Image (tube, rainbow, N blue to C red):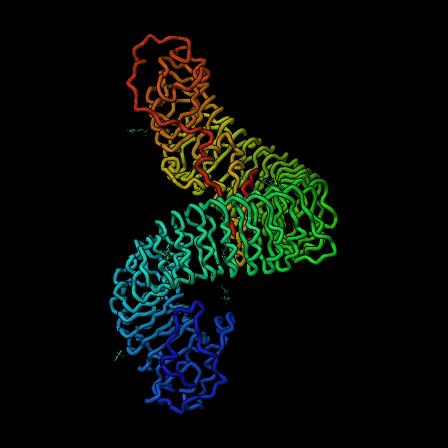
Amino acid sequence: MKRTPSDLLVVFLAVIPLHFASSETLPSTSSTKCHEQERSALLEFKQSFFDAKSSVCSLYGHRQKLESWKLEDTNCCDWEGVDCDEGMGYVIGLNLSESCLSGPINSKASLFRLAHLQSLNLASNNFNYSQIPSAIGDLVELMSLNLSSSSFKGQIPSQVLKLTNLTSLDLSGNYGLELRNPSMKTLVQFLTKLEHLDVSWSNVSTPVPDAVTNLSSLTSLVLRYCNLRGTFPTTIFKLPRLQLLDLDSNPELSGYLPEFHLGNPIKSLSLWWTNFSGSLPASLGNLAFLSKFDISYSNFSGNIPSSIGNLTQLTMLDFGINKLSGEIPSSIGKLIQLSYLALGTNLLSGEIPASLTNLTNLTFLDLFDNQLTGQIPAEITRLTQLTYLILSFNILTGPIPKNISNLESLDYLDLQSNNLNGTLRLDVILKLQHLNKLQLSSNEFSSIIEPSMNVSIPNLSALGLASSNLSELPIFLSYQRRLQWLDLSQNRIYGPTPPWFLNGSMSQLQFLNLSSNSITSFTTFKCQNLMTLDLRFNEIQGLIPLPPKSIEFYLVSNNKLYGEISPEMCQLSSIIILDLSKNKLSGVIPPCVSNLSDSLIVLNLNSNDLYGRFPQLQNDVCGLKMIDVSDNRLQGLLPRGLANCSDLEFLNIKNNQIVDTFPSWMGSLSFLKVLILCSNGFHGAIGEPEARDQFPNLRIVDLSINNFSGCLPSAYFDMWSAMKVHDADYTYYYGTLVVSVYIFSGDPRNNDHFITMINKGNLLEYERILSYLNGIDLSSNNFIGEIPNSVGSLTELQMLNLSNNALTGSISLSLANLTELESLDLSSNKLSGMIPPALAQLSFLGFFNVSDNHLFGPIPQVNQFTTFTIDAYEGNLGLCGVPLTKKCGNPVEALPLPPPPSPPPPPSGALAEKLDWKIVLMGFGSGLVIGSVWG
Ligand SMILES: *[C@@H]1O[C@H](CO)[C@@H](O)[C@H](O)[C@H]1NC(C)=O
Ligand SMILES: *[C@@H]1O[C@H](CO)[C@@H](O)[C@H](O)[C@H]1NC(C)=O
Ligand SMILES: *[C@@H]1O[C@H](CO)[C@@H](O)[C@H](O)[C@H]1NC(C)=O
Ligand SMILES: *[C@@H]1O[C@H](CO)[C@@H](O)[C@H](O)[C@H]1NC(C)=O
Ligand SMILES: *[C@@H]1O[C@H](CO)[C@@H](O)[C@H](O)[C@H]1NC(C)=O
Ligand SMILES: *[C@@H]1O[C@H](CO)[C@@H](O)[C@H](O)[C@H]1NC(C)=O
């Protein structure tokens, strides 16, 4: 077949790539005959690369263009994908995109004998991670080259620089492609005629070169996922022909929006997930041609200028996940072409502007997670094209508009976490026949009207009615057969679950959250797809309900379950989080639990009545990151198999009857952050570390209430390096862990905004020690000797408790180096000497106790020391000065005043303050954060 060269210039501005029209049925329009050498070059190329069975082929259903290339067919100009020039009959265009080419390619490929090629498109094939052959540079007449998504790898050859007539270059979607030598700078210096440049997914790793500004013909520049750095040259925004600029997914690329002038031709501007910041200039209103504007997930701040209302060509506007503040300008109501509007996760306040209800072409509206007040405008029901309506996490009040059922196209309605009130008319909302996901949790509805049984309601796939004042399971659920995700937590549902519930009808269910209700029994259920079951905080009695084998997250803590943990639980081969804590389970932990240790990440058996030995964990593969078996009656030694759990971050065996020595053999667990052995029968000296760098990540050590003896572990203090460096990342406990677990198991096809907050209150369960980020508690043992100076090297320590031992000597001066210390307890030892005045420099110290020692001399009288009461000093016959009644009469009291202290923060709240546990999670499936796995 035959096309003119101009047909071959792909129109790159289209978002959807423009493919050549399917043309098998078109008759040939020319009688041009091709040259025999070119014909054989083409056939040879087909022979060496065409693989109708290739994976690309079957995976994407690509058409097999090359099947039309036949040996017996002499006129190759008629072959599909081949274009010849009219006069000479040379092949000038070759489009073999999506043609099932498979295998490595090199410079010997016959393709490079087609010396007259002006346009070459090999996109979407599989060249098996070979380099782009240097012979590409021989095709000097090329004007258009498209090698996108074809599994090329390695450095782009410098021969490409010879293709100075290129106007269009697309190398995108080849993940391992490098632009280093030649660099992007060299590339744009040579290829000065470029109109379209796309090197997305190549590793550029440099700032965007200023030289791009010299490409005066440039109309489209696409640099997504290029690992760009530095500051983006503002002048590029002003290129006279630039219509499309896409810098998505370059999180290290900074930049600002410039002042825009009237006549700027830009049509599509996309800065998603960059580090662009600053405000949106009012001159934005000059971008009269702008139709797509996406700056989401960047760092913009300030108000949305009202000139936005001048961008009347906009069809897509996404400002989500920035720091924009102020009100939504009512001029936004002039953007009547808009079909997609997202302003979610900003700091926007005020009411939803009434003008928004003029945007009748909207299909997607997201105002999620701002501080919007007032009512949902009743006229919003004019937006009859809407498929997504997301107003969740605001402060909206009043009713759900009663005409909501006018939104006939609605697929997804999310109004959760507002202050909506009145009667929840589910009978009205469920008239929406296309509704698929409905999230109304956490509002202030006073009652609910369900649809009556005989009307037709949509088959929902997800339903959230958490914290909705329900006193029973809504009966309409009994005929919701497609439900996959159901959240009815935090209601007042009481009694046994009714027989219809989970008995066959909800066989698709993958996620069920009934936590925080008053359910008393939970019978067997037939949900063979269930992955998350959350029944925490109910009154469920009886044996542990055995979940289906599909279960990944099984959370039944805080109930009244009794009996033994059945060995059948060991067959839950997909389980990731098992939380049976705070029940009345008894018996031994079945040894087969160790079979689960390769899938299991969190094991929480805290606060039951389990006894016997902890299972051996002899599996070579142990993926466990957290183990909590505290508050039981476990006996024997710690299982040495724990040493195989190389990802372990958190171990709590507090309050059991383990009799063992210090587990120095765990020192190589390089992720271990929290080690709590409190209140067991540990004994003996801690001794010297067996190797260097033991416990390098430890931040919380609680060995209190045991029988340890000997000296304090001075050499370990030297090694616990995590307590020495300031770490700005405060999310390192179960926060990151649980969150990452959920994110990774979320179904990427359902990246909707269903959200749960991690409640910071729930993290303070282990208040005494876990409210600190770095703490050491060695109290109530038999430690002897002096406080070693090495403790002063743990400069990030916030809590140190050495009380109730038999320590002697004086209070180490090095303690004054612990400038983050909030709590210091040295009481009930045999310490002598004075309280070092330098301790008064510890400006965060909120708790201090040296009672019952042999201290003497004056109590410091400045800073924090003016706040401690008499209890802190009692039982030391030699101490004097306020608050004790004994006067000092000693000039040492008149110490020079250190600089005025900054006011101390409330010590126990430190963790809560530093953590901003608002985690946005996407996805159904199992995509819900459980903030209180430990609750
Ligand atoms: C580049 O294009 C110009 C103008 O179209 C043409 O005259 C010249 O021959 C081309 N150069 C090469 C190397 O093909
Ligand atoms: C919008 O455009 C009009 C004219 O097209 C102009 O007068 C007005 O100042 C612009 N508004 C803003 C806020 O830029
Ligand atoms: C709404 O979209 C349709 C096409 O989807 C278009 O024809 C129409 O002009 C748009 N309406 C407005 C007010 O922009
Ligand atoms: C909606 O558009 C109409 C016509 O342009 C206009 O008269 C009206 O004021 C607009 N409504 C709002 C609330 O902005
Ligand atoms: C809903 O809340 C608003 C504001 O708090 C209040 O004025 C109104 O009376 C409430 N409506 C109902 C039906 O409770
Ligand atoms: C305490 O800090 C001082 C001064 O910063 C330093 O000389 C001393 O070595 C430190 N002591 C310890 C034990 O780290």
* Quadrant of the rendered image containing residue 636: top right
Q: Is residue 18 visible?
A: yes
* Quadrant location of the N terminus in the rendered image: bottom left
Q: Is residue 141 above or below residue 787?
A: below
Q: Is residue 341 above or below residue 676?
A: below
Q: Nearer the viewer, residue 105 or 392?
A: 392
* Quadrant location of the C terminus in the rendered image: top right
- The x, y position of residue 861, in whole percent, is 36, 16
Q: How many marks can you see?
A: 0
Query: Residue 211 vs residue 701: left or right?
Result: left
* Quadrant of picture, ligand 6: top left
- The x, y position of residue 582, in whole percent, is 61, 36
> Which residue is drawn at the image coordinates 45% and 41% (left, top)?
731
Q: Nearer the viewer, residue 538 or 468?
A: 468
Query: Residue 654 vs residue 245: left or right?
Result: right
Q: Is residue 745 visible?
A: no
> Which residue is drawn at the image coordinates 63% and 38% (left, top)?
537
Query: Residue 648 vs residue 436: left or right?
Result: left
- The x, y position of residue 454, in whole percent, is 74, 56
- The x, y position of residue 157, in whole percent, is 30, 69
